[in-house]
Amino acid sequence: MQMIADLHTHTLCATHAYNTFTEMAAAAKEIGYCALAVTDHAPAMPDSPHAWHFQNWSAMPREIGGVVMLYGAEANVMDTKGGLDLSESQLKAQDWVVASIHSSCVPGLLTRREANRLWLAVAETPMSTSSVTPSRKTTAMTTTLSRRHLPEITRSWS
């Protein structure tokens, strides 16, 4: 199987990454990727970019050095109901959204059942979809997996 895109990346706007958009696109092109999704941490994560960072994508090029660019966020799951740290209007402004659990955003340890319920709640949010298009729809990669496996996950709760 050939990888054609990386859909979860961070730029130097995230404090633990060190490359610009242009440098990342060049590296993606060099290894044969056709597309790259920039998904810096959303605002609830400590030291993440300000919310403004996620509202200015229209100023960014749709292609850099022959690599299609998708602009989005790594949204933080904030509670066991699947709430995210970006509003619905902010989510709609993204090309791609990855939803992640970070200990600084969801306090305490989750049981397996709580974690399963959390991901199912994320999968059921109105902004989640299993069909990915680079138009103004958003998707969490984990949500796509969860939707496909929804029947078997819910059966395991009994």
Image (cartoon, grey):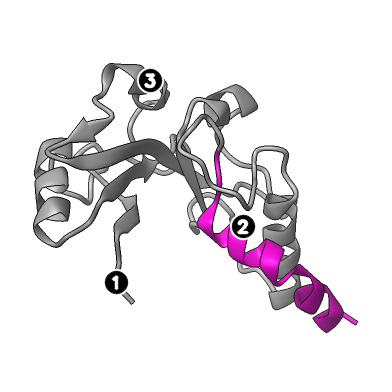
User: Is 141 part of what is drawn in magenta?
Assistant: yes
User: Is 47 part of what is drawn in magenta?
Assistant: no
Which segment is the magenta one?
Answer: 138-158
Residue designated by label 1: 2
Instruction: Give the spatial CA distance, label 3 vs label 1.
Output: 35 Å
Instruction: Give the spatial CA distance, label 2 vs label 3.
Output: 25 Å
At label 3, the amino acid type is Trp
Residue designated by label 3: 52
Would residue 128 appear left or right of 63 to someone viewing this image?
right
Task: Measuring from the top left, give residue 35's x and y in whole percent.
Answer: 29, 48
Query: Which label sits in the foreground, 2 or 1?
Result: 1
Pick whichever, 62 or 11, lies toward us: 62
Residue designated by label 2: 143
Q: Is residue 108 visible?
A: no
43 vs 59: above or below: below
Task: Measuring from the top left, give residue 115's x and y in whole percent.
Answer: 67, 67
Instruction: Give the spatial CA distance, label 2 vs label 1.
Output: 23 Å
| Residue extending farthest right | 158
57 vs 147: above or below: above
Q: Label 2 neighbourhood size at 10 Å, few (<14), some (14-19), many (20+)? A: many
Q: Residue at x 24, y 25 (%)?
A: 61
At label 1, the amino acid type is Gln
Q: Label 3 neighbourhood size at 10 Å, few (<14), some (14-19), many (20+)? A: few
First along the sequence among labels 3 and 1? 1
Report the number of discs.
Answer: 3
First along the sequence among labels 2 and 1? 1
At label 2, the amino acid type is Thr
Rendered image quadrant of residue 134: top left
Query: Which label sits in the foreground, 2 or 3?
Result: 2
